[in-house]
Image (tube, rainbow, N blue to C red):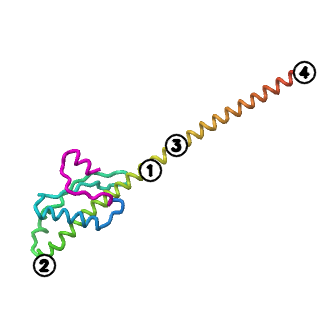
Amino acid sequence: KARDFYRRRQWTVKSEMLGFFDRLAYSHAQELAGQLMAAYLAEEVDEVQLMYNEFRSVAVQRVTREQLLPIEPGTGAAATTDYLYEPGPDAILASLLPRHVTTQVFRALMESVAGEYGARMTAMEAATKNAKEMIDVLTIQYNKARQERITKELLDIVGGAEALRQAVEA
């Protein structure tokens, strides 16, 4: 759906991964995150933004957009404190950054899947409730029609018996 949405608006879709929501795995997030980081590092794109359905509750999902790359440095006292790192900060960042990006992509995918399942569950509950209500209405209609038919047959029998009684008396 997302691909079709962007194509209708003449956006360039460079890559697509179809069907992986059916059996979502962390490896899907790794593959996607790898493609996104490669495009960013090759300067094919200036930034990478995630757009996904944030899972709020079974009945509520919210379309969310977050900047994934570049990662903005933090501000405040905690961000300016100097620490000595072993190995150096560059090696730590080189190790942690791909994990962070992959984890954020996986989180977004999982929230979208949870939202989809929640929407399906809500729709199925509503359909079940509507079907039960329809069964109740149809059962009442059936019982009324059956009762009318029985009443008509009884009236025919009583009328016939009355006609026979009058014929015998005459």
Which amino acid, mark 4? Glu
The residue located at (34%, 51%) in the rendering is 60
Q: CA distance from mark 3 to mark 4?
A: 54 Å
| Residue holding disc 3 | 133
The earlier-in-sequence mark between 3 and 4 is 3
Tell me where residue 136 sits by quadrant: top right
Q: CA distance from mark 1 to mark 2?
A: 53 Å
Q: Secondary structure at mark 4?
A: helix
Which amino acid, mark 3? Glu
**Quick one: 122 or 27, which is closer to the camera?**
27
Which circle, 3 or 1, is nearer the viewer?
1
Circle 3 crowding by C-alpha within 10 Å: few under 14, some 14–19, many from 20: few
| Residue holding disc 2 | 85
The earlier-in-sequence mark between 3 and 1 is 1
| Residue holding disc 1 | 124
The residue located at (24%, 66%) in the rendering is 31
Is 53 drawn above or below residue 30 in the view shown?
above
Q: Which residues are magenta?
A: 1-20
Is 92 drawn above or below residue 163 in the view shown?
below
The earlier-in-sequence mark between 4 and 1 is 1
